[in-house]
Image: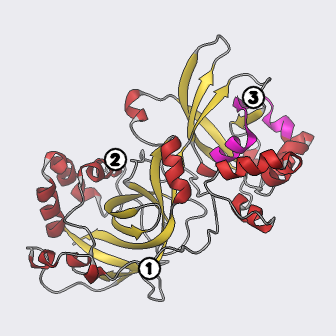
Amino acid sequence: MAALLTACASPPLPTASPLPPPAAVVPAVIGSRPGDTGPLPASLVQAKSRWVPVRWAELPGFEEDGLFEAWNAWIKSCERPGPVFAPLCGEVRRLSIASGEDQRAWMLTRLQPYRVETLQGAPEGLLTSYFEPVLKASRQSGGANEAPLYRAPATLGSRKPWFSRQEIDTLPEAQAALKGREIAWVADPIDALLLHIQGSGRLAISEPDGSQRTVRVAFAGSNEQPYRSVNQWLLAQGVTKINPWPDATKAWALQNPQRVQQLLWSNPRYIFFREEALSELDAAFGPKGAQGVALTPGRSIAVDPGSIPYGTPVWLASRGGAANLQKLVLAQDTGSAIVGAVRADYFAGTGVEAGQMAARVNQPLRLWVLWPK
């Protein structure tokens, strides 16, 4: 199970303009399409959300989205479907080569959109974003490479929570438990922390024989300590510029080298990894999310499973300074910072550009689940 987290567990409220009401952004023609008539079903109540049935006309941008990439993500979900969507997976696979118009027509026939609201009836929430970093690493410590990335220790389940980040760095007992569990070393401890926050990533590794190869390091467990936002810690220190993260954090660290350890220890949570080979096919997708399937850049989101079950197709609408999004996505992941009814973390992809986008997304959100009729 992936532990993919946003860089800010308690992000500030978004400052972008509120999302427009649905009628202001949806072509009226959708309401007359076959499959968008007849009585609506009853609302559905989940553990953390209420789903209110709506017409397809409420979904902003439904006619404009290119569905091909979303269909690839849906096929990935069909590798491990839940009982509700498993009966549709044969049709989903057959439609992978269909036109967008045929895919849309099928959705109208087979699915019912529900607006996701809080249990108190609020339809708007928060969108953030995450990505898969790519870091340079070495199999051997020394020189510039002094920040280790560890496999899970054998004693991880023997105490809960396990040692905190500070204790891992300072207690002989914790260090003994991790001795020999190093996967690789990276040069910058803030890069290592970034990998812990994102939950997985890729390493461009220098091997002892001088060869180079790229592998994926995936989430393999945590110390189960509470997650604390480094951004929130910096704000509490009076730092006003915290984005883009981690660049702003590295700039602060250069100016305050004597406080870097304090910054790192402000987040007690520590992530352990497992190394995975990275084939050419694997490289086209992201890491596996909590559903157990590979994430698709721009088409996978992390959600609170108490609001939206894994594998559910979701219509997402969000407008802000980082991105204007109206598109079909799949709920395929979660994270400890992703809590609440209308809450999502958008998987931006892999590498520097994806990271730059992910650092900027903090904006209003509306969601509609697309549930079988």
Q: Which residue is mark 2?
A: 76
The label shown at residue 97 is: none
Q: Which residue is mark 1?
A: 18
Residue at 71% x, 56% y: name it: 224
Observer-side mark, 3 or 2, equals: 3
The answer to which of 235 and 291 lies nearer the viewer is 235
Instruction: Say if the magenta span includes residue 21.
Output: no
The number of callouts visible is: 3
Quick check: 34 left or right of 124? left
Magenta span of residues: 175-196
Q: Is residue 222 above or below residue 227?
A: above
Disc 1 and disc 2 in contact, CB within 8 angstroms: no
Instruction: Say if the magenta span includes residue 187.
Output: yes
Q: Which residue is mark 3?
A: 145
Give the CA separation, mark 1 to mark 3. Answer: 45 Å
Residue occupying the far bottom of the picture: 120
